[in-house]
């Protein structure tokens, strides 16, 4: 039976809810601390423990505060085939990756956390992280690698952009730059290669916008228009 494994010190924890269709829904459970409310008797006096290890001490009602975040991920409780077991393994790996990222964010938001991580500011390094992320299938990582190399080639070939080949601040990626990159792709690619590279490039930008690393999407409205001659280059 497929089951989520947890470690006591993890916060949030990965938990599962059994469904009637033979699957389990995955979610994250955050522990937000506890609150203590004094217990009073009918006369308004603080109740005191009369026996046990707490004898003589005031009594408090303790409430543990938790919240859940549904991941919209599901595992098969009783996998019967290798394909189902592989699917469970991949789903749990993705859920654990999300859990770890949320844990880092949760720690950063806690008051007094000294090792707070700064947001990524280098678009090139952010692009490389996507290129090397094993969460993507191999063909996608290969495509991201091609899109990245061609973007660096594009920057190197333009005088005013050459200084950005080592470090490109997020807010310096402009619509003009993205449009120029799209034109560069049409010159150096064959078939649907240009469109594919631009699509992956825009995907990375969209992720950066979604994570709050960019205020505006510089690729918005930029599309790849391929003529018939370009599509027949590879034939």
Image: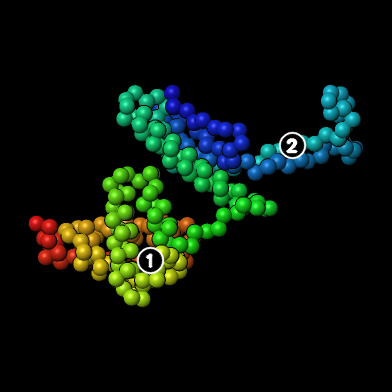
Quarter of the image with the C terminus is bottom left
Q: Residue placed at 71% from the left, 38% from the top?
A: 63
Most foreground residue, 102 or 68? 102
Label of residue 186 in the image: none
Q: Can you give x and y, in whole percent of width and height, for residue 192 in the image?
A: 19, 58
Residue placed farthest to the left in the image? Answer: 235
Q: Quadrant of residue 182?
A: bottom left
Q: How far across and down, in percent of the image, does residue 190 sit?
A: 17, 60
Q: Nearer the viewer, residue 25 or 20?
A: 25
Q: Is residue 100 visible?
A: yes
The disc placed on residue 62 is: 2
Which residue is disc 1 drawn over?
165
Q: Which residue is painted at 51% across and 30% down in the image? A: 5
Q: In the picture shown, does residue 31 fall above or below 126?
A: above
Quadrant into which the N terminus falls: top left
x and y percentages locating residue 33 in the rendered image: 68, 42
| Residue drawn where x is 53% and y is 40% of the image | 28
The residue lying at 30 percent from left, 65 percent from top is: 153
């Amino acid at each position: 039976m497929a089951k989520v494994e947890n470690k006591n010190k993890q916060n949030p924890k990965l938990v599962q809810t059994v469904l009637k269709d033979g699957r389990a829904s995955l979610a994250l459970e955050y522990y937000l601390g506890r609150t203590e409310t004094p217990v009073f008797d009918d006369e308004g006096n603080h109740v005191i423990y009369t026996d046990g290890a707490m004898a003589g001490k005031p009594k408090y009602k303790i409430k543990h505060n938790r919240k859940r975040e549904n991941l919209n991920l599901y595992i098969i409780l009783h996998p019967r085939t290798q394909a189902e077991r592989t699917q469970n393994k991949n789903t749990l790996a993705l859920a654990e990756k999300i859990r770890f990222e949320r844990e880092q964010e949760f720690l950063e938001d806690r008051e007094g956390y000294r090792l707070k991580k700064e947001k990524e500011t280098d678009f090139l390094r952010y692009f490389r992280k996507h290129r090397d992320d094993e969460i993507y299938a191999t063909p996608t990582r290969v495509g991201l690698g091609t899109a990245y190399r061609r973007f660096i080639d594009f920057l190197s070939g333009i005088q005013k952009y050459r200084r950005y080949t080592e470090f490109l601040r997020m807010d310096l990626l402009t619509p003009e730059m993205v449009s120029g990159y799209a034109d560069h792709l049409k010159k150096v690619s064959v078939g649907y290669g240009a469109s594919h590279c631009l699509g992956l490039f825009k995907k990375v930008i969209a992720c950066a916008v979604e994570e709050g690393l960019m205020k505006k999407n510089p690729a918005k409205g930029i599309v790849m228009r391929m003529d018939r001659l370009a599509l027949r280059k590879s034939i």
